[in-house]
Image (spheres, grey):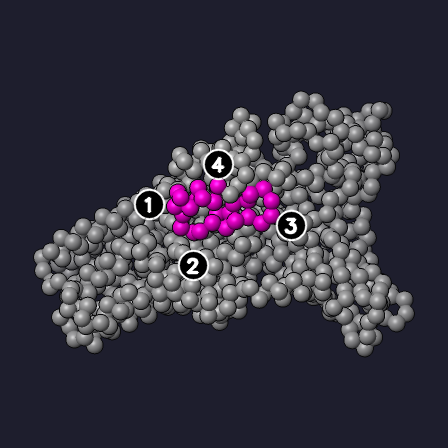
């Protein structure tokens, strides 16, 4: 039973992909690149459209996504000399999701981009346009996606012609763009509200049905609050609720005003108020590939090599053996080695090789799944499977069954931990193999030093390179046990088997139970009360299955068969409860606590614009390293006091569940998982702190931040 559970847990990441929202993005968004002309002329700009057609009920985002989400981004690969302008955004719609208000597009949208060819082109060489479109498509859940779009156009020697088949598409796209407002807008402040008066719009006030304002700034207004409209002969006035009334009011509020009037049905009018700010490259501006090529080349010179990444991965895997996730499993396996100490040295070495094979096979399978999902457009990283309540519950069930076996409640043989003398010779080696599988599975919540850079490198390279780095990580994890089995002198120092082993075996059950309890706590962060109850009932069914199995061992043939049927039914019931956990899944987890704010990219951007220092902590409930760092360093009184004295904002991002904003930030700094600690000093790039923190390390880093005058009295303490 345990063997089957441990094997299934390794691959539950794939089964849970659909449960987490890793649906195939192409099923939700059909995207294409459409050119207005049928040919290209040297030096003559032309327009292309990034056409996106969403599945009914799903949406993508505007440049300001509102309360959540990310706008589409396009990174071009263009012929040398071509340049690409920014995206021209159609007027968005308000899209309510629960208590949030998002800004975006449903159904179909076309994002227009102007491309400019170089002054000269070879008429005999067609022009190839291509690029990678990245987006986040959401319903009540969100799925990150990407598509490589390409188009080949001939070079024209005379005037270019438009494509008749796309005339309607470009006409609709241009009609959806906001037009410049005839008059400057006037902004006034009334308490915690802003009153926007756009001036003359050329519309009949009596015909205006609705009006909504979409600011370019992500932190200017409360997006979900009602926008009060007043339209009369004096003009239109829109009252907006400020997002942060304590902040100084803005002098201007550029954005898009959408007004709906009566006509032959509702008619939509969109006006651009003020200047649209440029989009920073990190937020999705389309770069000029030809101009940025030298910078990219220079950056690659400082990148990790395969040999360097493999070395870091090996060291990280070696240190993983000391992590609280892995050490109990390794201890149990070493204890089982005492059982085999009387066997021939060649046989003992086979146990070490079987364990190593289990570790390597598991790491390669997990890495292959991770690489395949990322290649399909999923924005995920190391430990992604633990973002699924299904996997977390399955691990808790597995560890409970293992603990019951160690406690003597049920005798399941030596398949997993190497206990028991009744297995065939092949079965004993199989047990070593599956112990390697379990060691890998329970290692995923932990991050060791050196791992972050190595795994981040692996996930940005080709599949063979990535698998080689993960194999090095697995080899580092397996090495201590492999050396123990290969060194006769070490085996001779092991104590002789005896009654003490049963006592120690029972004692080792309790850290296993503690790990199962921790997993239940993680599950409580991912699901609501009904889901947590289902998970707890699943544990009861696992315990019942173990009890029934053991009763069957002691009974006659008929009673044994009945007991086995009951045990199997209980296991199926526990599996059914686990599969239903996503129905009560928590959509978002707030990481805010005493002295901390919940991380959002918009909040971080606002702090950076103010020049205020910030400490960003990317964490997850299932990341043991994160929890240890929190308690031993970040949550200490001296660190909190240092943050307050210097006016450093403390932002926590919770990656317990999928969060594309956090994933994007991790990838920006070459990481594929948590923890990640960034210290923004108020100017320039942030300082990346070590993955294993001490109080002294954090305080030393904070010393480099210049204190904000009067931080505590000004209320800037986090």
User: In the image, is residue 684 part of the stretch drawn in magenta?
Assistant: yes
Using a 10 Å C-alpha cutoff, classify the residue at mark 2 as few (fewer than 14 neighbours), some (14 to 19) or many (20 or more).
Answer: many
The quarter of the picture where residue 498 lies is: bottom left
Where is 245 relative to 665, above or below?
above
Q: Position of residue 189 (x, y in %)?
A: 71, 25
Please identify, in this view, whether the residue under mark 3 or under mark 2 is nearer the observer. Answer: 2
Q: Earlier in the sequence, mark 4 or mark 2?
A: 2
Q: Which residues are magenta?
A: 677-703
Which residue carries the number 2 mark?
451
Q: Earlier in the sequence, mark 3 or mark 2?
A: 3
SS label for mark 2: helix
Q: Residue 225 occupies which quadrant of the picture?
A: top right
Pair 4/3: label in front: 4
Farthest right residue in view: 158
Residue identifier under label 3 = 283
Residue 676 is at least partly visible in this image: yes
Using the image, tell me which numbered label, if any, was put on residue 643: 4
- Asked if the residue at tag 4 contacts the one at tag 1, i.e. Cβ–Cβ closer than 8 Å, the answer is no
Q: Which mark is residue 518?
A: 1
How many angstroms separate mark 3 from mark 2 (CA)? 28 Å
Quick one: label 4 or label 3, which is nearer the N terminus?
3
Front label number (1 vs 4): 4
Say whether residue 588 is left or right of residue 277. left
Please name whichever residue, 687 or 675, is drawn nearer the observer in this view of the structure: 687
The N terminus sits in image quarter: bottom left
């Amino acid at each position: 039973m345990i063997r089957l559970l441990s094997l299934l847990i390794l691959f539950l990441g794939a089964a849970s992909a659909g449960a987490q929202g890793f649906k195939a993005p192409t099923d939700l968004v059909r995207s294409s690149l459409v050119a207005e002309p049928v040919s290209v002329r040297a030096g003559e700009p032309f327009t292309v459209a990034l056409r996106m057609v969403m599945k009914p009920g799903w949406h993508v985002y505007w440049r300001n996504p509102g309360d959540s989400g990310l706008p589409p981004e396009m990174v071009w690969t263009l012929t040398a000399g071509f340049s690409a302008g920014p995206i021209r955004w159609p007027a968005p719609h308000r899209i309510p999701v629960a208590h949030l208000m998002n800004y975006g597009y449903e159904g179909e949208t076309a994002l227009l981009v102007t491309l400019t060819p170089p002054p000269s082109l070879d008429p005999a060489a067609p022009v190839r346009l291509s690029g990678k479109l990245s987006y986040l498509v959401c319903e009540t859940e969100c799925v990150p996606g990407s598509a490589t779009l390409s188009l080949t156009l001939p070079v024209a020697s005379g005037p270019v012609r438009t494509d008749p088949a796309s005339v309607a598409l470009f006409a609709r796209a241009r009609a959806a763009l906001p037009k410049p407002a005839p008059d400057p807008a006037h902004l006034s402040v009334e308490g915690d509200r802003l009153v926007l008066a756009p001036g003359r719009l050329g519309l009949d006030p009596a015909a205006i049905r609705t009006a909504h304002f979409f600011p370019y700034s992500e932190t200017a207004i409360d997006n979900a609050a009602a926008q009060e409209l007043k339209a009369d002969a004096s003009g239109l006035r829109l009252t907006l609720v400020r997002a942060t009334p304590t902040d100084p009011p803005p002098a201007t509020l550029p954005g898009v005003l959408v007004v709906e009037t009566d006509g032959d049905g509702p008619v939509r009018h969109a006006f651009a108020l003020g200047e649209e700010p440029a989009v920073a490259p990190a937020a999705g501006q389309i770069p000029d590939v030809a101009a940025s090529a030298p910078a990219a080349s220079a950056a690659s010179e400082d990148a990790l090599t395969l040999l360097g990444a493999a070395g870091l991965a090996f060291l990280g895997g070696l240190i993983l053996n000391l992590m609280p996730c892995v050490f109990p499993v390794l201890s149990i396996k070493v204890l089982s080695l005492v059982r085999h100490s009387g066997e021939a040295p060649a046989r003992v070495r086979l146990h070490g090789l079987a364990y190593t094979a289990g570790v390597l096979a598991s790491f390669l399978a997990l890495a292959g799944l991770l690489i395949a999902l990322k290649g399909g457009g999923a924005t995920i990283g190391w430990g992604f499977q633990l973002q699924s309540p299904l996997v977390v519950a399955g691990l808790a069930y597995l560890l409970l069954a293992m603990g019951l076996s160690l406690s003597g409640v049920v005798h399941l043989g030596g398949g997993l931990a190497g206990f028991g003398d009744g297995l065939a010779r092949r079965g004993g080696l199989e047990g070593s193999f599956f112990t390697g599988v379990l060691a890998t599975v329970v290692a995923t919540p932990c991050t060791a030093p050196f791992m972050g850079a190595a795994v981040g490198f692996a996930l940005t390279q080709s599949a063979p390179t990535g698998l080689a780095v993960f194999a090095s990580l697995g080899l580092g994890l397996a090495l201590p046990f492999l050396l123990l089995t290969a060194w006769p002198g070490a085996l001779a120092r092991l104590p002789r088997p005896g009654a003490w082993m049963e006592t120690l075996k029972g004692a080792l059950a309790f850290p296993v139970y503690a790990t199962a309890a921790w997993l239940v706590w993680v599950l409580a962060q991912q699901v609501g009360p009904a889901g947590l109850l289902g998970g707890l009932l699943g544990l009861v069914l696992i315990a019942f299955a173990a009890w029934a199995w053991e009763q069957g061992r002691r009974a006659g043939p008929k009673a044994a068969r009945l007991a086995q049927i009951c045990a199997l039914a209980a296991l199926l019931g526990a599996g059914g409860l686990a599969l239903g956990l996503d129905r009560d899944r928590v959509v978002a987890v707030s990481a805010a606590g005493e002295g901390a704010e919940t991380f959002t990219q918009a909040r971080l951007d606002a702090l950076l614009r103010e020049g205020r220092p910030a400490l960003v902590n990317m964490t997850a409930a299932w990341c043991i390293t994160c929890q240890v760092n929190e308690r031993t360093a970040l949550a200490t009184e001296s660190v909190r006091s240092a943050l307050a004295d210097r006016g450093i904002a403390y932002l926590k991002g919770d990656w317990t569940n999928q969060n594309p904003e956090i994933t994007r930030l991790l990838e920006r700094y070459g990481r594929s998982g948590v923890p990640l600690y960034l210290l923004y000093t108020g100017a320039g790039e942030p300082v990346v702190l070590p993955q294993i923190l001490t109080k002294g390390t954090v305080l030393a880093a904070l010393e480099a931040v210049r204190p904000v005058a009067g931080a505590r009295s000004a209320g800037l303490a986090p």
